[in-house]
Image (tube, helix red, strand yellow):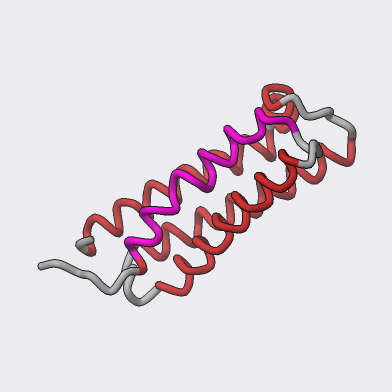
Amino acid sequence: MKTQIKSKWLLAAGAYNLVWGILSVSLPTLQLDILGIATTPVVVILWQCIGMIVGVYGIAYVIAATDPQVHWPVVLVGLLGKIFGVTGMIFYILNGTIPWEFGLTCCLNDLFWIPAFVSILSKKNPS
């Protein structure tokens, strides 16, 4: 994957994470209601904390987009977070802790980005 394409993927991931993070912090019950997750005060606070973390990742991805080869550790940490996010989602859906609808969030936040992040980290860099 060429550096310019890598940068565009990271900019897209950064923008997505920033928007998702801002929405999660400012409108947590809207997302939780859509996902079928009960909105207790503790759940809302935790969802807002997750939104803050996702938003901070967005800032990191935008920075990494300036030079993906130099900032590869940021991409690696992001990839690991996405892999662990999918793993956790599958585990908690299968044991009935969270509803299947939650999978939509995980697909958009994590699963969708994994191939691009793997490609960004690959040594292949065609001219």
Residue 78: x and y, percent? 52, 61
Left or right of residue 14, residue 27 in this image:
right
Measuring 65% from the left and 28% from the top, which residue is drawn there?
A: 101
Estimate the x, y position of residue 3 in percent, counting from the top left. 23, 64
Residue at coordinates 45% horizontally, 59% vertically from top-left?
61
Residue closest to the far bottom: 70
User: Left or right: where does residue 84 sit relative to residue 67?
Assistant: right
Q: Is residue 34 above or below residue 93?
A: above
Q: Nearer the viewer, residue 102 or 91?
A: 91
In this view, 45 is above or below 1: above
Main SS of the magenta part reads helix
Residues shaded magenta: 99-120
Q: Quadrant of residue 1?
A: bottom left
Question: What is the quadrant of residue 112 in the picture?
Answer: top left
Question: Residue 47: x, y in percent?
Answer: 74, 42
Percent position of residue 88, x then y: 68, 51
Instruction: State which quarter of the image contains the C terminus.
Output: bottom left
Q: Is residue 21 magenta?
A: no
In the picture as drawn, the residue positioned furthest to the right comes out as 41
